[in-house]
Image: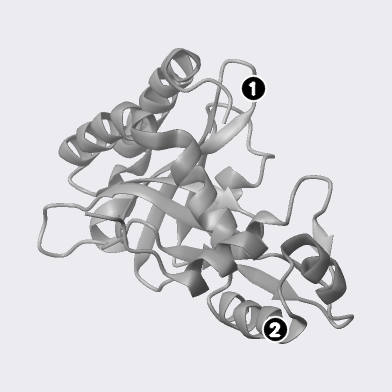
Amino acid sequence: MAQRRVEAVERALTLLGAFSRDRRELTLTELANASGFYKSTILRLMASLEYFGYVVRDERGVYRIGPAVLRLAPLAVEGPQLEDLVRPVLVALREASEETAAFHVRDGEARICRLCENGRLQLRHHLDEGARVALGEEEAVDQALGGELPPGRVARSHGGRQAGLSTVAIAIHDDAGELRGALSLSGPSARFDARIEAHHAPLLIEAAARLTHAWPRMLGPI
């Protein structure tokens, strides 16, 4: 059976394909020249792409790639290998701590929860994979993703983003020292705080060392 194709979708993808490393910003005229589409058609398609965050348009009317593409790009590059590497580590962290374990990556001035294993206890911190939130200075995960936390150092936050929530996080680097993401454990402060130094922080330090050792073999540069 012949594949069913949607002309409007193909035209929108053609417009996205006009952007490149050397052509990061395009005007309406440049998009028309690159695609061969009428400007009225481009305006309609780009309005939809802009609404969903795949392009942004500045005050000059110039278009560039939007944050939705940035959010999806790591998923395509990493493929299943990131899951194979990180998921078992998160499961082990969750089982050892009983708290929610997650792996986060930075996306501009925000972070994305790429993978998580929610705690099993009835009262827990629930995270959704793919969730994107703005960075904040008071949150442990954001400190770990800021690039200034030394390898092996655990960041701590108490109520930084949500009252009653405690988080510990550690930056994940490859063996060349490049920041790859951050691991976190999070849960209710009343249960969480007393266990940080004696239990949760050592778990993160050990997990980070495991990932740093394994990362080059499985993923290489992202």
Image coordinates of residue 17 in percent, x first then y, are 65, 55
Is residue 136 something one can see in this rendering?
A: no
Displayed quadrant of residue 69: bottom right
Displayed quadrant of residue 65: bottom right
Q: Which residue is the extreme one toward the right?
A: 60
Could you say which is closer to the camera, residue 123 or residue 6?
6
Q: Please give the residue where the numbered disc 2 appears in the rendered image.
A: 43
Q: Say which amino acid is labelled 1.
A: Gly
Which label number is shown at residue 165?
A: none
Label tally: 2
Residue in the picture at 28% in, 55% down: 2
In the image: residue 139, left or right of residue 194: right
Could you say which is closer to the camera, residue 162 or residue 19?
19
Residue 128 in the image: above or below residue 215: below
Secondary element under disc 2, as helix, strand or loop, is helix
Q: Residues within 10 Å of mark 2 (few under 14, many from 20)?
A: few
Q: Residues within 10 Å of mark 1 (few under 14, many from 20)?
A: few
Q: Say which amino acid is labelled 2.
A: Leu
- Please say if the residues under marks 2 and 1 sit with CB atoms less than 8 Å apart: no
Q: Please give the residue where the numbered disc 1 appears in the rendered image.
A: 177
Residue in the picture at 19% in, 52% down: 119
Image coordinates of residue 176 in percent, x first then y, are 64, 17
Image coordinates of residue 28 in percent, x first then y, are 82, 75
**Quadrant of the drawing holding the C terminus:** top right
